[in-house]
Amino acid sequence: IFKKGGLVMYQYTSSPTIMDKENGGSGGPTYTQQVLQKHFFPVLLDPATPKDKNYLIKEGITFCWKSVATATGNSANDLLVVAIYPDILFEGPRQYLQQWAQALVQKTASEYHHFFQVTVKKRLEQDVRNSDNDDDFFITLPDVETFDKVFRILLDQSKNQKQQMSTSSTPQPQQATESKQETKASSKKGNNNNNKGKEKRQWHDGKAKVTKEAMEGLDMSKKESEEDKAVAQDRALQEARAAYLPTEQDLQLLEESTDDAGDDDEATNQGMLSDLFAHLTGTKKLTDADLDGPLQQMQELLQSKNVAAEIAQELCRGVRLKLRNKTLSHGYRVSTAVRQALQSTLEQLLQRNQVDLLQNVVNKRKSDFSIFSSGKKGQAPYVIAVIGINGVGKSTSLAKMTYYLKENGCNPLLVAGDTFRSGAVEQLSVHAKCLDVPIFTQGYAKDPSSVAKAAIQQATQNGNDVVLIDTAGRMQNNAPLMKALGKLVSENQPDFMILVCEALVGHDGLDQFQMFSKALGHQRKLDGLLLTKFDTVSDKVGAALTLTHETGAPIVFCGTGQKYHHLQKLQASQIIKALFS
């Protein structure tokens, strides 16, 4: 899609080598520009070219185009939509593809016109509001990635239509009329025979043998058409995107809640902390004897909320060091000092083994690629294996991490390594479509280790800088599946092993961690934890602290909802707010 002046607005290339493998070209955008300059533009700019011409074959290449002005009736629009194919697609019995290509170009032109109008108008208004100097004003081009998602949906729909056109056996008008007359006659005959009752069904050929034709005649199930399938697939994808992808309003609310978090935490904690230490205000410097009573109450309170005794003692020790020999004149100063001491101690606890997954991916990239550049072909990707028991939300959590990494400039590849559970591959494929990222699958009943190995090789060849492997959910006492997991890890050596478990799992979480660690063997350990349903733990957040303390594995992320952006890093301020709310 480009302006007649030459400015390219959008470009999609599918299998570029099919265009020039016999012409000595290099494929991709460069080759596309070459064939446009050589064959298309001269025809387009020739005054003798009819205005309604939209089809051209030159040196084995087919051009099919549509002006947005013609498609929408907006004469002021100077955008053109061009599709380029090898002309072999339009030879012989497949001439119907010309009609299909023209329909796709027409749809794309109409859709891009609407998209362009909406996005440009929105950005114009934003630029006008933000610009103090008219000389600095310029128009930002529409976001390519946003329209790319729209075009891929149009392309998928058109592929289904193309398949219908290739298999269609629509009767000619005369045949249709005859068929209609036969139907009417049959209906009339049926009406005349209504008084004869139900017609006897023939169950076999008279020799007690059920034929294939008889079985087909007995099959009353409705055959779903390709068009129905396409509509159903499109509807399912739209519903999935609505369920998982964050809206602009969602992201705005998230940003606002993050900005206001500090004030809310302080206001929430002030009451309870003031009550615990209220009698310590005055002009006297605080001693250990003064602090013993309130800190003992605090330790009991923390342990009642599932905080391990060792962690509770360490938190109280941090508060003691902060308040010792201090003079606190009023309650607000007491609660502020206690909260700051708690937050400082908690941050030290959480950061002992903390990892930055995004930074790990970036560090593995070679050369001087920035965080916003995609992977380099031939470069080994950063491999993340996601494991856990059944039903904790591994696939959704994997999709959330994919969204996080993609939003921060990575180029991920999903791997359907759960070849055991029925529907697992389809579930992950839906996430891949919603996220618009590639997925590697080999179906079911395959060796997960072999699937992962092939996926890593593909990622290396295609330049994906991070690979996320979904694995089968397994109970920690399922020996065969645990053995398969150990094989996957030993043969593929993932860079990061993350265990997904529920935030309120309690002591069973430690049991899961130990059993999965045993399955991995002594040569490898679990690198981190992802806690799901963290938004439901309320004041029982201490279970999460206990789990990371006893396992020594950091909490990398916490799931806080269903949508992809509902993934957060564990913050000390969040824990304090939950513990003392």
Image (cartoon, rainbow, N blue to C red):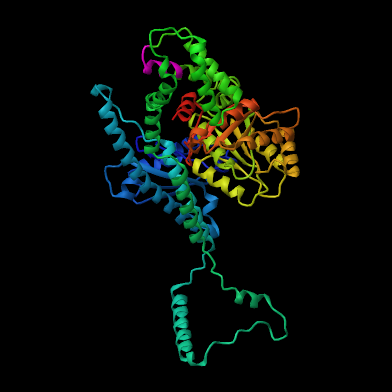
Q: Work out which quarter of the rendered image holds the N terminus and state it.
A: top left
Query: Residue 4's x, y, as percent?
Result: 35, 38
Q: On screen, 184 above or below 248?
A: below
> Count of labels shown?
0
Closer to the camera, 55 or 306? 306
Q: Main secondary structure of the magenta part?
A: helix
Locate residue 504 relative to residue 135 in the image: left or right. right
Q: Is residue 111 visible?
A: yes
Closer to the camera, 547 or 135? 547
Does the magenta run of residues contain 336? Answer: yes
Locate residue 64 relative to residue 559 in the image: left or right. left
> Which residue is painted at 53% across and 21% down in the image?
296
Magenta stretch, residue numbers? 329-338
Q: On screen, 23 above or below 334?
A: below
Q: On screen, 204 above or below 137?
A: below
Query: Residue 82's x, y, as percent?
Result: 42, 44
Query: Residue 324's x, y, as percent?
Result: 49, 9
Does the magenta run of residues contain 25? Answer: no
Q: Quadrant of residue 307?
A: top right
Q: Is residue 377 visible?
A: no
Closer to the camera, 133 or 517? 517
Q: Work out which quarter of the rendered image holds the C terminus and state it.
A: top left
Q: Quadrant of residue 212?
A: bottom right
> Which residue is painted at 46% across and 55% down in the image?
100
Query: Residue 111's x, y, as percent?
Result: 37, 47
